[in-house]
Image: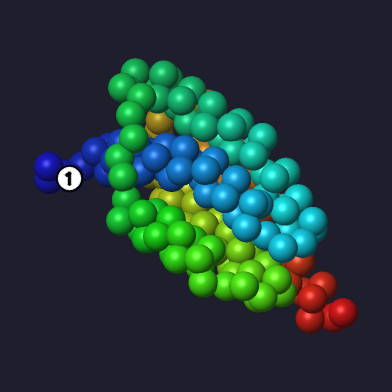
Amino acid sequence: MSITSKRELFDRELRKLYHAEIEILDLHSDLAAAAASDEVTAIFGGHEGDTVDQIDRIEEIFATLDMETREQGSPIMEGLIAEKDQFVLEIEDDELRDLDVINIGMINERLEITLLDRLILLADELGLPEPTKSNLEENRSEAQTALERMQQFLQDRRIG
């Protein structure tokens, strides 16, 4: 399907974001299970509720815009899942595994933030009805907070 308008682009990106958030539920669960330390496990385990809330907000956007609630896969997200699957089998050292878990989590949050930034811009340009933009902004804020928590973990490791 050819994209010929900003609205079609918005719709496609919203479906990609929805797919990503659903995948993130499993991804975070897997990362929490793979983590060696309780601290890293808590970073991912504590984000599950936020992800469920983010999915609910996306579903609210679908309803507001009278769109069918459906996912559209993304090769980027599939690659991230494949990366997670590969590292879980390869890394035995606990410290290295925690670092890899955090890095995969950070890549995920940055991807999510990028998708959300694009959607917020398009929602604004298209003048889409509320709560479209505010839901996207709230999801972005939560993704940014999660990223900062992971970055703080790495910073603390450098200092310690």
Q: Quadrant of the C terminus?
A: bottom right
**Up/down of 24 relative to 52, above or below:** below
Q: Dot 1 corresponds to which residue? A: 3
Residue found farthest to the left: 1
> Does the image show residue 129?
no
> Does the image show residue 46?
yes
- Of residues 36 and 18, the one drawn nearer to the viewer in this rendering: 36
Image location (x, y in percent) of residue 49: 67, 35
**Kind of residue sitting beneath label 1:** Ile
* Left or right: residue 156 compared with residue 138: right
Q: Quadrant of residue 48?
A: top right
* Left or right: residue 39 compared with residue 103: right
**Up/down of 19 relative to 92, above or below:** above
* Total numbered circles: 1
* Left or right: residue 9 compared with residue 76: left
Taking the spot 40% from the left edge, 60% from the top edge, the residue there is 82
Image location (x, y in percent) of residue 74: 32, 50
Image location (x, y in percent) of residue 36: 72, 63
**Up/down of 106 relative to 95, above or below:** above
Please tell me how crowded label 1 is: few (under 14), some (14-19), or many (20+) other residues with Cα within 10 Å. Answer: few
Taking the spot 33% from the left edge, 29% from the top edge, the residue there is 70
